[in-house]
Amino acid sequence: MDVPEHARKGKSTRSASTSQHLFIRDLAGEREVPLTGDSVSIGRSRDNDVEIEDISSSRQHCQLRRIQGRWHIEDLRSRNGTMVNGILVRRQPMMVGDLIEIGKTQIFFGEIPERHRSSSPAGETLQLSTEYFLEPISEQVASDDSLRFQKEREIFLRLLELTRDLCAILVTEELFEVILQNVIEISGAERGFLIVEEEAELKVAASRNIDRDVVRRAHLQVSHSLVRRVIDSGEPVLTGDARSDPRFHESVSIANLRLESVLCVPLRLRGNVLGAVYVDNRFEKHSFHQGTLRFVQFLADQASIYIENARLFEELHRKQGSLHTAKDQVEELNRQLQAMLLARDVEPEEVRELVKKGARPGLKHSFDRIVTRSPVMLRVFELLDSVIDTDMPVLVLGESGTGKELIAQAVHLGSGRNPNSFVSQNCASIPQNLLESEFFGHVKGAFTGAIRDKKGLFELADRGTLFLDEIGDMSPDLQAKLLRVIEDGEFRPVGGRDTVKVNVRIISATNQRLEEMVRDGRFREDLYYRLNVLTVHLPALRERREDIPLLVDHFIDLACSRLAMERPKLDPRALYALYHSPWPGNIRQLQNEVELLVALSGNVILPENISPSVLSHRPGSTKREPMRGTLRELVAEATEGLERQVLTATLQENSWNKSQTARQLGVSRPTLDQKIEKYGLKRESEDRKEKNE
């Protein structure tokens, strides 16, 4: 057999010892190459002893080495691997008649076995070696079932190994590279591109050619119209002659790039298309087949999951870094703030500037309605941020006035239930005889006074959120009914025959120790575990004292806006007193106090205007009365005192115009009359008249 002129290392006559020769079949035909020396290199580079023109071959693909008189083959970590008798090998001794396959190239060691002598030309026969979900292309190939099944098995094993590797990669750039390299190898493509869509723009995230080099100016080397077609439709495109394909006659990029074979597969996940895998061959038509498409598409579907996982991991890592940075910054600023507020003459403007430097961490959901810079509260936000999108029940624990309802509103606003109702109810304020009607509604005529149908809290909150405050004050009867609704998602209105089905997220809150109440039998244990899926502990204001200047500034703005007055200055001594007070009534007490200060002050908020109940607890006070009674009683007493002062000041400001006062305070006229009677408030003229009499 003569060696063609393109047979790289010169012509050779066949020796008597057939074991010292290689017989090569490729698209150019057949040739014989002698084995000389102790090592023979095989690959696509001209530097090899045996150069093969096969796009699936690496530059240095494999080598034959003589060890103790016997030849061995060794794969040189090639892209597509080296197969001996249909099995991928790394290193193996050779026997006469063994078949080495590199892409579409067949190399017989020593001699060509009889079963291969009548095979069809290499260009036709060798399609078997790169068709991974093999389809017979001739009767001769179809008859070699064992080899075909063996190759299929190798590919499936490779797929299993690859999915394990991909699962461990959590960096998107590295993941893109591994995915793309494997797609190029299993498809035998000349080039490959992994393309993602960012803000409606196509971006080449990774590119490689057969030599594993990055494709220069990669964004100009792909047909954007073809990729856009795949991403918009979510369906793959396979063409063996792109320039003649009627689907792409209007594509200028395909004509300009002179593309022949193109395979583009979408990266799909849960009905969304993340991007596409694009491979091509500019020199050979019909390089890819339906079997290749099926394999690449399956790999792309698996890869999409790992890409999304890596993106979520990176996003979480980035947010955690942002959160830690923000916490460190806030803690340092808080130390500066505390040092500053130890002095009585600190200027509020200096405090305000320092507070503005505190950065809020970048979380998935916004908690902007909650005024804070405390690390304790930032940890609460971090916890809530991970569960807001779920329907998980949340139990908020904390003293009265710590902002439990604000937390519930933030959870509702950040969830998918936001478009629907947020319904809030204080369980302690419902009269016993109206409990069932308030929660579940009633039909007309159900009892005396039921003149029309009424929807209960659960029906009003359907597909939304129901916030139940002070659940520790619920009666045992209501606890049992509430448990039934939570478990079944349905109830029957008072006097009704038909059940009503609802979908409600429950957020509950209390300032009591529910665990102790469960042990004492005052709260149902099964209901407790239904409500206590996620527990959030809100700190008292004295435990987040660094928020006091921020809250004071915020409440001054609110009060000035409501009273339509210019913002007064804050005397440094007043800020000092407010900062160092214990605030048993927490944020609610602080807000009431600030509103009172704004109402009573002129251009400057002076410490003389602060309520005695607040000043009596400031540091250095020598007239401190002992605190008697429970925390609830003390808070109620302090709150009532502030409420009385605010009512008196606002009535005097409005010349005792009750309607205007009610509108300004945001209460109804009957409520205002009740409070005037409760506190025995009278005009100064009436008070003087009574004294004179």
Image: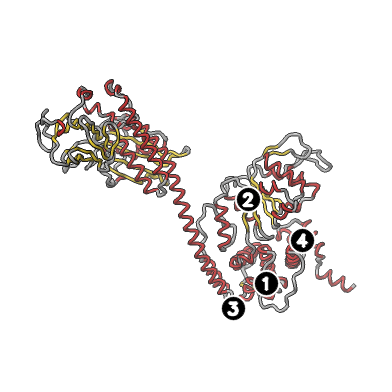
Residue matched to label 2: 394
Measured in 3D between alpha carbons, the distance from the residue under mark 2 to the one under mark 4, in whole angstroms, is 41 Å
Q: Earlier in the sequence, mark 2 or mark 4?
A: 2
Q: Residue at x 69, y 58 (%)?
A: 511
* Residue 153: % across, % down: 35, 32
> Which of disc 1 and disc 2 is earlier in sequence?
2
Residue 662 occupies quadrant? bottom right
Q: In this view of the protein, which residue sits in the foreground, 233 or 334? A: 334
Pointer 2: residues within 10 angstroms few (<14), some, or many (20+)? Answer: many
Residue 658 image label: 4
Mark 3 to mark 2 CA distance (whole Å): 43 Å
| Figure check: 566 above or below 120 | below
* Residue designated by label 1: 601
Q: Nearer the viewer, mark 2 or mark 4?
A: 2
Name which of mark 3 and mark 4 comes first in the sequence. 3
From the viewer's perspective, is the residue at label 2 or at label 1 nearer?
Answer: 2
Q: Amino acid at mark 1?
A: Ser
Q: Which mark is residue 91?
A: none
Query: Which callout, 3 or 1, points to the residue nearer the camera?
Result: 3
Mark 4 residue type: Lys
Query: Label 4: few (<14), some or many (≥20) within 10 Å?
Result: some
Tell us which disc is closer to us: 3 or 4.
3
Q: Is residue 241 visible?
A: no
Left or right: 373 in relation to 590: left
Q: Position of residue 346 (x, y in %)?
A: 57, 76
> Relative to residue 6, is residue 528 depicted above or below?
below
Which residue type does callout 2 highlight?
Val
